[in-house]
Each structure stands twice: as structure tokens, then as C-alpha cells.
Amino acid sequence: MYGSSDAAAPAAAYEFVDQMNAGVVRTGADLLCSLLQQAGVDVIFGYPGGAVLPIYDALYSSSLRHILTRHEQGAIHAAEGYARVTGRPGVVLATSGPGATNLVTGIADAYMDSTPLVVLTGQVVTESIGRDAFQEADIVGITMPITKHNYQVRDIDTLPQVIADAFHIATTGRPGPVLIDLPKSVTSGPARDAVLPAPDARGYRVPGHPSDEALTAIQDAIRQARKPLLYVGGGIISAGAAETLRQFARVNQIPVTSTLLGLGGFPAHDELFVGMLGMHGTYAANQAITNCDLLIALGVRFDDRVTGKLQRFSPHSKKIHVDIDPAEIGKNVPVDIAVVADVGLTLQALAADRLSADTGEWRAQIAAWEAEWPLRYRADDTCLKPQAVIELIAKRTRGEAIVTTEVGQHQMWAALFYPFSEPRKFVTSGGLGTMGYGFPSALGAQVALPGETVVCIAGDASFQMNIQELQTMVDYALPVKIAVINNRFLGMVRQWQQFFYDRRYAESRISSPDFVKVANAYGVLGLRASTFDEAKVAIEQAFAHEGPVVIDFVVQEEENVFPMVPPGKGTDEMTLEWEG
Amino acid sequence: MERTISVLVNDRPGVLARIAGMFSRRGFNIASITVGTAEEEGLSRMTIVSSGDDAMALQIVAQLQKLIDVIEVHDISRDQTVKRELALVKVHITKTTRPEIAHILEPFRVSIVDVGHASLTVQATGDVQKIDALIGLLRPFGVAEIARTGVTALLRSGVLESGYAGADTPYRPLIEADATNDDDLFETERE
Ligand SMILES: Cc1ncc(C[n+]2csc(CCOP(=O)(O)OP(=O)(O)O)c2C)c(N)n1
Ligand SMILES: [Mg+2]
């Protein structure tokens, strides 16, 4: 490493080395590793550099597992995948400056989708902070608005408490990323081993049980409703409330619609499931949300991709909103009954009795909408349909695989055509819509759960955003199946250009390398399918293969995702087909 | 309407940046912000004057509460509070205007903290209206410089605050209360 940022006072350094040799002290980095292990960490996704050399040196003799990616963005998305399939915090380590800034997209992504992460960044030595030292970036300042909280540890004595609080904050309440910036002088300086203390963040309180008034209000509203609808999101999954939700919905015969992030929180094959709602929601779900008389919103945030034009959003309903984050309540949509509480505990308290009146007529109405416009696509023998690829994969994996996606049309098709029946099976970037998320997150998911089938449904363009992680997949022998839905387009961009910019396909046609050859260059099995029959064969071959596979599905170029609520329209103003 | 929010925070580096950043990012306005040490060691009290309807005020309080370094938030806009601001006003003087200025200043109970040949500096404390009024009266003489601290505020004794959004208290909207402002312009030493 260059520059003065490594210069420490020599006398102190020698003394420290003597003490080290005498076994009196260890380094801050050793203490860090010890505290991480005490916090239950088993694996770290990271990439080394000058400012984290002391930490890597400590890792060298630690039993913590480290996954070396090819880009820090790959590391953080892998950590997100790990967190999303396990519910445990993903841990990331990167060096100062460019290492830290390469994490920013992943931090923002985790913040938007409430994914628990503990992000460790190296920093220049404390004496150099603020002097524009080599590889200095104010990562604490940069990430303030995209972390749940962040810290810079300037005094090693504060590290145990910071680690304890960081894990507590990242994983409780509404989960999210917490960043800890670690100056090199702190991790290389002396430290004594310490016991991980109990968390002690005074300004941080986690809501738990709903109040009795809130429960009574919810119960009364459900008793009075004729057309109730459960609108559930990622909060159901973070709260571990999928099973309680299922009981509650069944006992009361209330239909359920889910956000993108909530998929798997309620079984897709259940009669009461109406499908995903919102911009690319099902016809029935969007009709139901528009026409219900009671909207029971659980662990959701009324995102604009869900609500469409706010004035037309569920105009006839009384609204109940239960969320653990008080700031979500009333943020976008005013509600009638606001409950700041854990959705799981709220559902448990409600699940005891049957509350709702007969919803038979309402369910019949929903069934009629489902029959009127079921999820469908126009079959075409001359080409491979992207939706058919998803259906084939779903069939081969019996709807039980962990599916990660990139961002674009293929993501929406995966959400619509893969039937998720359990929580923590669907890993996708919802709030930030991060291309480049899907492939590394699949690697993280596979690291966490080596026994599971992990499929990455990728777009031809998105895959190229973190394609370098193929080597990480190979290094750690992660048998991920990558299904590239190759439409030779930034498909989602092209769809908008077709609909709203008069088919002027500005920069949305995109070329790709030969993905089969790319796979082969990494020593990975590569397959290609351009027809339905080829797709069937390729999928069979891919899932029979023990190792990782890249399948290049050459699909119809200009297929569109339907239904679509055009921007600025109400949820019931769906475009179901496009002529012209 | 104008909102006064009292925030108890950890006295740690970056806390002001967290709060100011949250306001700017979410499009909440800050009319003034004051910070100083609070009753307990290690804590600071901020008084933030903002504006917005009830829904926005609730969002401001909830978003503040979400910050880990924020210990307590009180929207005290509708409560009986003591609100004070300190201003230093440097006004031009001449032989002829000097007695006139002194005459104007008298009912304000201000102190003159610096006098030069061509200007004098007045220190005034009081609520915003009083300071505004004083400055308005001094302007015709030529005001050279103004430094105002922004409002700092506390609840009056015996007043229960409304609109407290503690994370562990059940959610409740702001309780409508009559806006009361019983500070009169010239009375500063009442409490
Ligand atoms: C990092 C990033 N850059 C740009 C976008 C905007 N964007 C959304 S979808 C999309 C096209 C994705 O193309 P592809 O991965 O091939 O998926 P397809 O829509 O064709 O299925 C783009 C460019 C984004 N979401 N993320
Ligand atoms: Mg594409």
C-alpha cells in the first residue's frame, strides 16, 4: 500500500509487537472476529484491500468462513441472498474508499427491501480521517440515508457494544442494513478479548403486541365487512408470520393478495390466493383491491408500484394497516385503523376466533374475475415464450426451489408464473429494482442452504451486470442453475418504449456474448434452448446435472408483461393486451 | 401550520447531519434548528421549527423517532410552551438617531452589548414575534448585521404533551388542541 495512511508511531508499534509476542494483547481485528462469532456469524462475504488488511490477517487464523467474490457489489448482493433465505443477517466486508462505495447499491437495496445486513468497511487510520487520505471515502456520510444506522468505531473499547447493537438493530423491528466503519488503526491496534454485551441502544424500541383497543377495532371492522381483502407484504415473511396468516385467512375465509416481496408468505395454490397485486398484478387482485370494502394491510408500505394512482386506490374500503415501522403508517395512504405492532403477534391475537361474516358472495365475485382474465399468454409455435420457460422450471422443481431474479420482464414473469408456497423462497430486488442483484444473491442463498435447489431467473442484460461472479460460483462449487431469459432487449425498457414512446427503441436493444461459451470458459455447463421442446430437454439436463449450469433461453424478442397498470392510472385501469 | 418539535438526542458526532439529512431527503422544511446540551449528560436537546399539516407532522415525528440516536420526540406545536429566541442586531447610529433608538429599545427590555462610533449591538431575547417586531422598528435606521439563534422551547410546567410518538406507545394521531399563545410581546421575564 502507498501513502502515509499506514504510518503509525513506531515506538508504540514496537511495544505492541512485543506485547503481542508475549501474548498479552491481540489486535482489534482479532476482537472483531471473536465478537462476530459470538454474534452467531458463520460466513462473511467480502473483498480485501489495504484498510482491511488487519481484519483479513485475523480471518486467516479464524474459523469464520469467508467467501471471496469478484466485485464488492457481488459480495453484498450475495449477503442479501443469504439473509433473505435464512432470516439471519448477511455480513459483508470491504475495504475503504472504492471497496466501500462499491457496496452502496447493495446497501440501498437492503434498506428498501428491509433485508438485515451488517456491513463492515475498512477506513483509513484515525489520524488521517478528513484529510483526503489514499482510499478515504466518507462512507458513514454517504450511507446515512440508506442504512438503518451506521457507526464509525474510533475507540476499540466501544467495539463490543457497537457489534452487539448493530446486530440487534439490523435484525429486529423492521430489519435493515447497519454499517460499521473500522479505521485501520483501530483494527490493527491492541485489544483484549471481550464478551459480546447485551444490546443497549436507548433510542431504539421495537414495537411488539398490538394494544387491546387496536385489536378490538380490527375485530369490529372485520365483523362488519362484506368484502374484506388481506393485502400482505414482506413484513409477513420477516415476522415469520406465514403460518399464522394462513390460519387466520382460512378461518375467516378472507382472500389474500400479496406484494412482490410478500410472495411465498401465503401459498400460491391456496383457493384464497388472488395473486400479486399492483403494476403487474393479476386482474383479479387489482379488481379486488379496487372493490373491497375492508383492506387489511399487513407488513406492507403502500408502494407506488402497488397503489397506482393514489386517488383511485381502493376507494371504497375502510383501511387497517398493521406495521412494525410507525413511519410507514399514513406515509402514502391515509388509513382508518393504524396499528404499530408486530404483524405476527397481531395475527396470533386475532387468529383465535372466527370473525368475518359470510364472504361467499365476495369470493364468488373474485372467482368470476379470475375466470374473466386468468393469468395467460398467447401461445406461439414459432418461438419460445418466456412465460413457458418459467412454467417448465416451476414444474421441474415442483414449485419448491429457491428462485432469485434479476430485474425486468423476466422478474415479473417469475413472480406471476412461479407458484411460491413457502416464505423465503423468492429472492428479488423490489424496492430498488437492482439489475445485477439476482445472480450474486443466488450464490449467497446457495452458500446459506447448500442442500436446496437454487435457480436464478436472469435477464440477458441484468446477468451481464455481475457476470464476473461466475468465477465465485465455480470457486465454491455452488450448483446454481442460471436461466437466462434472453430476449436480446432491455425488455422492460423496450416495453415502456413500445407503449409510451411510440416504439422508439432508444438504446434498449442490447447484445450479449454467447452465454454458452461464457459458461464454458468458466468451466461451467452451458446449454441453449430456442424452442419449447429444446427448453424441456435443457431443463431436464440442467437439473439432472450436479454442478452449476447456465441455460440460454432464446425467447421471443418483443413479448410484453400483462396485465399492466400504466403509470398514473388506477389499479383497475389495467392494460390487458396491446394492439398496435 | 408552524410546527415546533423538541427532540432529545444522543450527543454523538453526526447526529445533526442525520437529522438535517432526513429533513432534506424527505422534503420537510426546517425554519430553524437549535441544539444544546440537555439535562442529562451525553444528551442534547434540539428544537426544530418546521411547517406542515397534521399528516406531515406525524411523519416528521415518526421519521425522527426512527433514527437510532433520537431518544425522544415531542411535537409541542399545540402545547403550552415557553419559546425563546436570542438575537443580536447591529444597527447604524448617528448623533441624531441614537436617542431615538434608545427610546425604541426601552420597552423591549433589551441590552446593549456593544457600542461603537457608528453602530451599536443590541441583544434581545423573546419569542419570534417580539424579535421580528424589534428588527422591524430598527430597520429604518439601517441594520448592518443580524444573528438569530432560532427558537428553543420547553413545555410549560404541568402541561401534558400531545402527539408523542414513542415507538412502544400505541399509535395515536395528534390530539387536536386549541393553538394557544399567551406570550405577549413585551413580557419576557414572566417565568
Ligand atoms: C442497475 C439498473 N440499471 C437500470 C435499470 C433500469 N431497467 C429496469 S429493467 C431493465 C432491463 C433489464 O433487461 P434484462 O435484464 O434483459 O431483463 P428483461 O426486461 O429483458 O427481461 C432496465 C435497464 C435497473 N433496474 N437497474
Ligand atoms: Mg432482456
Image (cartoon, grey):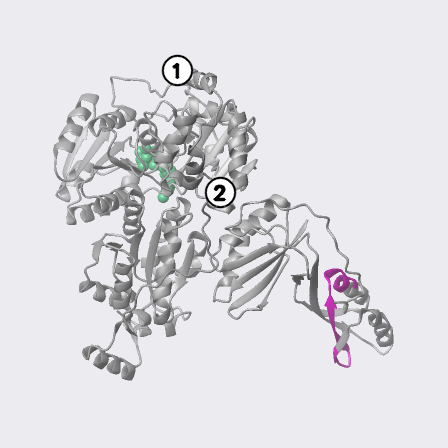
The extreme front residue here reads A353
Task: Quarter of the image for the C terminus of chain A: give it.
Answer: top left
Where, quadrant-wise, is the N terminus of chain A in this rendering? Answer: bottom left
Which residue bears the numbered disc 2?
Answer: A210
Q: Amino acid at mark 1?
A: Ala
Q: Position of residue A303 (x, y in %)?
A: 47, 38
Question: Is residue B119 located in the magenta-colored stretch of the structure?
Answer: yes
- Residue A303, relative to residue B101: is it above or below? above
Q: Residue A562, how many percent across, how many down?
A: 39, 24
User: Which of A538/A510 is in front?
Assistant: A538
Q: Pick whichever, A356 or A312, lies toward us.
A: A356
Task: Give the Cα distance between marks 2 and 1.
Answer: 38 Å
Nearer-the-camera pick, B150 or B96: B150
Q: Position of residue A36 (x, y in %)?
A: 28, 60
- The quadrant of the rendered image in which ligand 2 is seen is top left
The span shown in magenta is B113-133
User: In the drawing, does residue B186 fall left or right of residue A484?
Assistant: right
Q: Please give left or right for residue B18 compared with residue B181 in the image.
A: left
Tell me, yes or no, whether the highlighted magenta stretch contains residue A406: no
* Residue indicated by mark 1: A371
| B172 up-or-down from A375: above or below | below
Q: Earlier in the sequence, mark 2 or mark 1?
A: 2
Instruction: Please give the name of the residue rendered at 83% of the width and 77% of the height, measured from the top-left corner.
Output: B94
Mark whose residue sits in front, 2 or 1? 2
